[in-house]
Image (cartoon, helix red, strand yellow):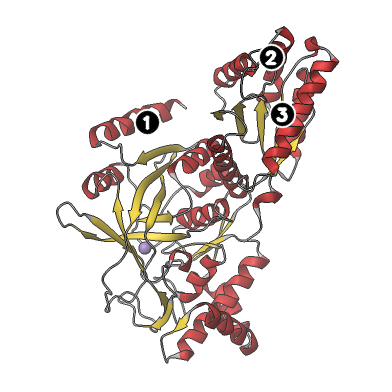
Amino acid sequence: MKTLKQYEFWLVVGSQDLYGAETLRQVNEHAKVMVEGLNADADIPCTIVFKPCVRNSNEIYDIIQAANNDHSCAGIITWMHTFSPSKMWIRGLNSLRKPLLHINTQFNRDIPWDDIDMDFMNLNQSAHGDREHGYILTRMRLNHKTIAGHWEDRRFRERISSWMRAAVGAFESRRLRVLRISDNMREVAVTEGDKVEAHIKFGWQIDHYGVEDIIAEVEKVTNEEIDLQMAEYASLYEMATEDIASVRYQARVEVALKRFMDEGAFGAFHTNFQDLQHLKQLPGLAAQDLMRQGYGFAAEGDWKTAALVRIMKLMAADLSGGTSFMEDYTYHMEPGNGMNMGAHMLEICPTIASEKPKIKVMPLGIGNRQPPARLTFKARPGKAILVSIIDMGDRFRMIVNDVVCQEQKFDMPKLPVAAVLWRPLPDLETSSEAWIYAGGAHHSVLSYCLDAEIMRDWAEIMNIEFVHIGEETSINDFRRELAYNDVIWKLK
Ligand code: MN
């Protein structure tokens, strides 16, 4: 995956002409030092671009227009080093089309007790300049994030980094193409949705192709291409089957799918096991290995989850931990030790494996094709989130649950798929009730690299509803929040 440094965030520092040239020179000087300091920090994933401070309505409008039109700019960061009267900002902010982060910081950390005078006070006045700015953002009901703290503070930088990743997710969302191979699984509701609304809200261009379009591509794949793909499998996975012909078939399908997606600039795809036409196997290993490379995937026609896998993988690009398509499968309901086992028929991403994945060929309980090759493994322990997007009819809702993935002590020798075992917060019963009341799907995205705050930021940028199930969740409060949200989103 590409590094996140390609995404730019413009630091727009507000001021006004009242202060005179010398103060404005110092404002720019300080902003430059800040930008250089932040860009030199390995924890800041993207590039911050210094822009000379803006002093009036025209300059503000012009820089916001330039940001809107810039293909590398993933968002703007505003900061009022001095006082910048906010009526000057209305025209520009009315036209803003990029995500907005408002930082409330100050160049100096400490008050210089012995030297402080009125010149110092006039220069370093974000304490009130940022309040004026915050008023207009709030008054205009602009979706934005505010982060306060000293710019050299670690926590402040971590929060900026997290927000940047959310903005990168929004940036990529707005140019995502999703390949639908066939339609949704028959009769299933939660994986359905309004694709036109998703295009408007998220920017997803969701296009259907027939299975035969893919098969035509599968038939073109050469033996040399299959050999190369098999060598790649051998370098990454353990071959735990003697049925090499079946593995080679998955390699053939992977080469075809990858070419089809790259030629059409698709970032995500779904299959549907009910509609395979004369594909010999349901794509298992092929889908898993494509997810490893960053493609979004979901099964059974679930284009929403496929898109979300892609976006979350891009947000987490350089972070370790892994992100995968997931499905709630089976409960462990031992009193005081409630857990959920996630898996799928085949398609769990090997980036979440705790061990070298094994390639196996086994029959599939559902469907009527040849036994497909797939990767099996145990997922790693650690904190993670589960994320689902559903269509409420009048809006999209994102549901996030904090979970703790457990070390898997049992070998489960008869289980033919990769599996994850997690303890959902606050506990299995409350989490399940909250998720079900919220309408969360059985399909989701599991990520060890991202957290609820970053997903909240992304949902806010995309202007969709967000609910979070975590340590603090109580079921009655959560239900009340859902009821209130129903009213709030009807008014929006
Ligand atoms: Mn499924």
Q: Is 15 above or below relative to 354?
A: above
The x and y percentages for residue 85 are 69, 13
Which residue is label 1 attached to?
A: 485
Q: Are marks 3 and 1 in contact (CB under 8 Å)?
A: no
Please report whichever mark, 3 or 1, sits nearer to the chain's N-terminal start: 3
Please report whichever mark, 2 or 3, sits nearer to the chain's N-terminal start: 3
Which residue is label 3 attached to?
A: 12
- Three-letter code, disc 2: Phe
The x and y percentages for residue 448 are 44, 55
Q: Give me the C-alpha separation between circle 3 and circle 1.
A: 33 Å
Q: In which image quadrant can residue 44 be found?
A: top right
Q: In which image quadrant can residue 447 be found?
A: bottom left
Q: Are marks 2 and 3 in contact (CB under 8 Å)?
A: no
Q: Is residue 335 left or right of residue 71?
A: left
**View quadrant of ligand 1:** bottom left
Label 2 CB less than 8 angstroms from ligand 1? no
Residue sticking out furthest to the left: 335
Q: 103 or 134, which is in the foreground?
A: 103
Within-10-Å neighbours for mark 2: few <14, some 14–19, many 20+: many
Q: 350 or 200, which is in the foreground?
A: 350
Q: 193 or 308, which is in the foreground?
A: 308
- SS of the residue at dot 2? loop
Residue 387 appears in the figure: yes
- SS of the residue at dot 3? strand
- SS of the residue at dot 1? helix
Q: Is residue 476 left or right of residue 209?
A: left
Q: Give me the C-alpha separation between circle 2 and circle 1.
A: 36 Å
Which residue is label 2 attached to?
A: 83
Residue at the (64%, 24%) spot, across then down: 106
Residue 394 appears in the figure: no
